[in-house]
Amino acid sequence: MGIEREEPSTNPHADRYWMRRALNLAHHAEYLGEVPIGALLVRDDQLIAEGWNAPIGSCDPSAHAEIVALRRAGQAIGNYRFPGCTLYVTLEPCVMCVGAMIHARIARLVFGACDPQRGAVSSRVQLADADFFNHRMVHSGGILPQECGALLRTFFRRKRARGEVSGDACTSSPGGGPSTSEGCYNRHHAGEVPKRS
């Protein structure tokens, strides 16, 4: 079984632009009472689909921002595979979302803040690099990590202050939220495992 891997071009300015758009979607999720995570799918610098966290409002535990964006992309282009596409998301994806991206043949993943507790790209497990898949997805993290992490930390601090969640409900790093360090992604790829609190 051969391994498919596309190498889409990267552009740091475009990555920041699209991540800011994903942050706007995360703010929309927060407005709706959802955990503020936003995602969008782009091909050839054109927006294909976008999504934000919606498990609470949709009563669907799989309605993570990435899954919502993938579902909308499938409807928009009439296919379940998205070769040549880049998925931008404000938080490092979980196991479910990484699996869906691999099955969708996403060429490239770009995420904002690392998730040291549940991240399935570089923090907790490195599922995107697993050798049992027949597709490899290029991935990079730490794009606007301060903004992405701060939005989540603020959201969970407010919820804890109102007694709506315990401290365990949010991804944790020293400081009580997603890691905003660009180094969390780079440490893994340099052979250093991120420290856990």
Image: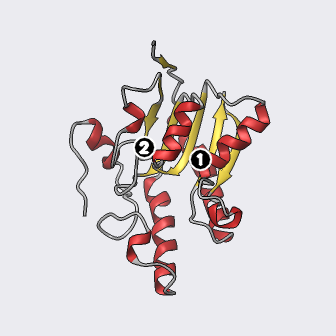
x and y, in percent, of residue 152 in the image: 49, 65
**Residue designated by label 2:** 141
Q: In the shown orientation, is residue 173 left or right of residue 59? A: left
What quarter of the picture does the N terminus occupy? top left
Where, quadrant-wise, is the C terminus in this rendering? bottom left
The local crowd at label 2, few if under 14, some if 14 to 19, many if 20 or more residues have their Cα within 10 Å, is: many
Q: Quarter-wise, where is residue 86 in the image?
A: top right
Residue at 68% across / 31% down in the picture? 80
What kind of residue is marked 1?
Answer: Glu
Name the residue located 56 percent from the left edge and 39 percent from the top edge: 100
Q: Which element is circle 1 on?
A: helix
Q: What colour scheme was applied to this rendering of the protein?
A: secondary structure
Q: Is residue 127 visible?
A: yes
What amino acid type is highlighted by mark number 2?
Gly
Circle 1 is placed at which residue position?
66
Q: Earlier in the sequence, mark 1 or mark 2?
A: 1
**Which of label 1 and label 2 is nearer to you?**
1
Q: Residue at x 48, y 20 (%)?
A: 5
Distance between the alpha carbons at the discs numbered 1 and 2: 15 Å
* Residue 13, visible in the rendered structure: no
70 or 58: which is nearer to us?
58
Q: x%, y% of residue 168?
A: 38, 71
Image-based side of 73 in relation to 189, left or right: right
Q: Observer-nearest residue: 64 or 193?
A: 64
- Residue placed at 50% from the left, 38% from the top? 99
